[in-house]
Image (spheres, grey):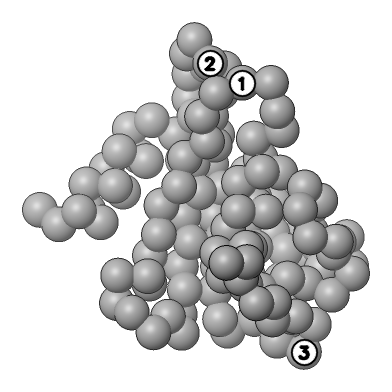
Amino acid sequence: MTNTTKKFDQLRNRCESTPFLQVHLGDKARVDMYWTKNAGSMGYQVYTVIYAWNADDDNDRILFSKSGGYGYAKDDHELASALCHLSLYPKGMRVGGESIPNQYHIGGNLYKVPNSKLLKRKPKR
């Protein structure tokens, strides 16, 4: 069993079946975010799956992330972390702690940002 398969099994066992947020970033990537089924001692956590279609390294094609701790907006933090990792941001979105602009909202939990509306940002070193 591969590490990716194990991560998806963990996601299936610990999280809701439908992502509460799904963001398509043109033809470059997709970000899916899930709430955990149970709160636990640190409250509900957020699991994030990043599908990077144009990743240079095969190890970066599917990435997993999980929030931790309490006392902050886990969903906003995980979204900002995913976009920072990808170095992609929708036009109209300020970097860090802000949700995807409403102009890209398709309906329900789905946002689609066309390639023409993506900004490439250099990662901080």
Question: Quadrant location of residue 103?
Answer: bottom right
Q: Are marks 2 and 3 in contact (CB under 8 Å)?
A: no
Indicate the position of residue 98 as horizontal and vertical percent values.
Answer: 81, 51
SS assignment at label 2: loop
* Position of 108 relative to 17 (above/below): below
Dot 3 amino acid type: Ser
Q: CA separation, marks 2 and 1?
A: 6 Å
Q: Nearer the viewer, mark 3 or mark 1?
A: 1
Question: Quadrant location of residue 86?
Answer: bottom right
Is 88 left or right of 12, judged from the image as shown? right
SS assignment at label 3: helix
Q: Pointer 3: residues within 10 angstroms few (<14), some, or many (20+)? A: few
Q: Nearer the viewer, mark 2 or mark 3?
A: 2
Indicate the position of residue 72 as horizontal and vertical percent values.
Answer: 70, 28
The image's mark for residue 116 is 3
Mark sitting earlier along the chain (2/3): 2
Indicate the position of residue 36 as horizontal and vertical percent values.
Answer: 49, 29
Indicate the position of residue 31 as horizontal and vertical percent values.
Answer: 56, 60
Mark sitting earlier along the chain (2/1): 2
Residue at x-position 50% and y-position 49%? 48
Q: CA separation, marks 2 and 3?
A: 39 Å
Residue sticking out furthest to the bottom: 116
Q: Pointer 2: residues within 10 angstroms few (<14), some, or many (20+)? A: few
Q: Are marks 2 and 1 in contact (CB under 8 Å)?
A: yes
Dot 2 amino acid type: Met
Question: Quadrant location of residue 83?
Answer: bottom right
Q: Which residue is mark 2?
A: 42
Residue sticking out furthest to the top: 41
Dot 1 amino acid type: Tyr
Residue at x-position 33% and y-position 32%? 13
Mark sitting earlier along the chain (3/1): 1
Q: CA separation, marks 3 and 1?
A: 36 Å
